[in-house]
Amino acid sequence: MNLQGADKEELAEILEQCYASTKMFCKVFLPDTFYRPFSKLHEQIFEILDDEKLQKVVIAAPRGFGKSSILSLAYPAKRILYRDTKYVVPISCSADMAMENSENLKRELLDNPVSNLLFGSIKSNDTFSKEEWITSSEIKVKPRGAGQQIRGRRFLTNRPDLILIDDLED
């Protein structure tokens, strides 16, 4: 979607739609990742993710379905850009895999022309490493491997409020 020619009202409407719909966010912000049509099962996953009343969710779908792209990239990117989270903990079977997922998320947020146009750079002068990174809006991302401690963590006054577990077992 080309947003360069859109006026402020059109941009505001698009931002509202993307905030309300993770599916729309995927199509607008991540068209290179989400280039195929979504299935009915995708629609169900998006409904679940967009339901604020649901605090704990488990999603199972076939391999190659795009679960990791949705849950490790699109969903946390949306929550970070709209500042709906303060402390993100992506978890995977190993610390290396969790860091790789976190790096993919960070790279996407740093290099994405749509997010940079609409939200500006997320890069801060604080910590910005593979082990953890803090955005310009003071959102912390701390990847962890299976068995690594999460309880008791705190960043400023915030405890982890978005924990994403992907491929916990190898």
Image (spheres, helix red, strand yellow):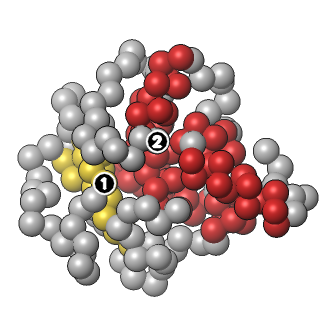
Residue that sits furthest to the front in the current view: 53
Residue that sits furthest to the right in the current view: 5
What label sits on residue 50 in the rendered view? 2
Q: Where, by quadrant of the figure, is residue 71 drawn?
A: top left
Element at label 2: loop
Answer with left or right where residue 137 lies relative to residue 116.
left
| Residue 92 at x, y percent in the picture | 25, 41
Residue in the foreground of this view, choosing between 21 and 99? 21
The reply to whether discs 2 and 1 touch (Cβ–Cβ < 8 Å) is no
Q: Residue drawn at (21%, 35%), measured in percent from left and top?
A: 168
Local crowd at mark 2 within 10 Å, few (<14), some, or many (≥20)? some
Q: Where, by quadrant of the figure, is residue 5 drawn?
A: bottom right
Residue in the foreground of this view, choosing between 105 and 96? 105
Element at label 1: strand
Q: Residue drawn at (36%, 77%), measured in percent from left and top?
A: 127
Against 63, residue 72 (above or below) is below
Question: Which quarter of the figure is the C terminus placed in?
Answer: top left
Amino acid type, label 2: Asp
Against 54, residue 12 (above or below) is below
Against 154, residue 72 (above or below) is above
Question: Which quarter of the figure is the N terminus placed in?
Answer: top right
| Residue 116 at x, y percent in the picture | 66, 65
> Which of the two discs, 2 and 1, sits closer to the camera?
2
Q: Which residue is mark 1?
A: 162
Q: Residue drawn at (60%, 23%), measured in percent from left and top?
A: 38
- Is residue 96 visible in the rendered image? The answer is no
- Is residue 3 visible in the rendered image? The answer is yes
Amino acid type, label 1: Leu
Answer with left or right where residue 80 lies relative to residue 6.
left
| Residue 87 at x, y percent in the picture | 31, 64
